[in-house]
Image (cartoon, grey):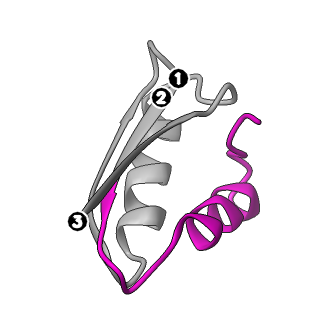
């Protein structure tokens, strides 16, 4: 398992949190996703069936790009 924490400045509310958790959580290889509107951080636990690039691409696609 790999755990990564991403800064996502565009998270502003509970709806944002739910969208991120639902969309990223549906990716193959994702074990868990926890988004936080207060800290604007997203914790993702994943296995070797996905990778960071795919996660970041999906985040951008759903309008929640990961900060550089």
Q: Which residue does the numbered mark 3 point to in the structure image? A: 1
Which residue: 68% across, 42% down? 66
Q: Which residue does the numbered mark 2 point to in the structure image? A: 41
Depth check, mark 3 against mark 2: the one in front is 3
* Circle 3: element type: loop
Disc 3: CA contacts within 10 A as few (<14), some (14-19) or many (>=20):
few
Q: Which mark is residue 25?
A: none
Q: Nearer the viewer, residue 14 or 10?
A: 10
Residue range highlighted in magenta = 45-68
Residue 30: image location, x then y, percent: 32, 70
Residue 17: image location, x then y, percent: 44, 38
CA distance separating discs 3 and 2: 19 Å
* Circle 2: element type: strand
Q: Which residue does the numbered mark 1 point to in the structure image? A: 40
* Circle 1: element type: loop
CA distance separating discs 3 and 1: 23 Å
Q: Are marks 3 and 1 in contact (CB under 8 Å)?
A: no
Q: Is residue 16 above or below residue 23?
A: above
Which residue: 74% across, 64% down? 61
Q: Nearer the viewer, residue 10 or 56?
A: 56
Residue 60 belongs to magenta span: yes
Which residue: 48% across, 52% down? 19
Say whether disc 3 or disc 2 marks the residue closer to the N-terminus. 3
Q: Are marks 1 and 2 in contact (CB under 8 Å)?
A: yes
CA distance separating discs 1 and 2: 4 Å
Q: Is residue 2 above or below residue 68?
A: below
Task: Locate the C terminus by quadrant.
Answer: top right
Which residue: 39% across, 61% down? 22
Disc 2: CA contacts within 10 A as few (<14), some (14-19) or many (>=20):
many
């Amino acid at each position: 398992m790999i755990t990564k924490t991403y800064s996502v400045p565009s998270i502003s509310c509970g709806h944002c949190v739910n969208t991120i958790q639902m969309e990223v959580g549906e990716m193959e290889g994702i074990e868990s996703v926890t988004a936080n509107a207060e800290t604007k951080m997203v914790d993702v636990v994943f296995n070797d069936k996905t990778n960071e690039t795919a996660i970041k691409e999906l985040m951008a696609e759903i309008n929640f790009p990961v900060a550089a």
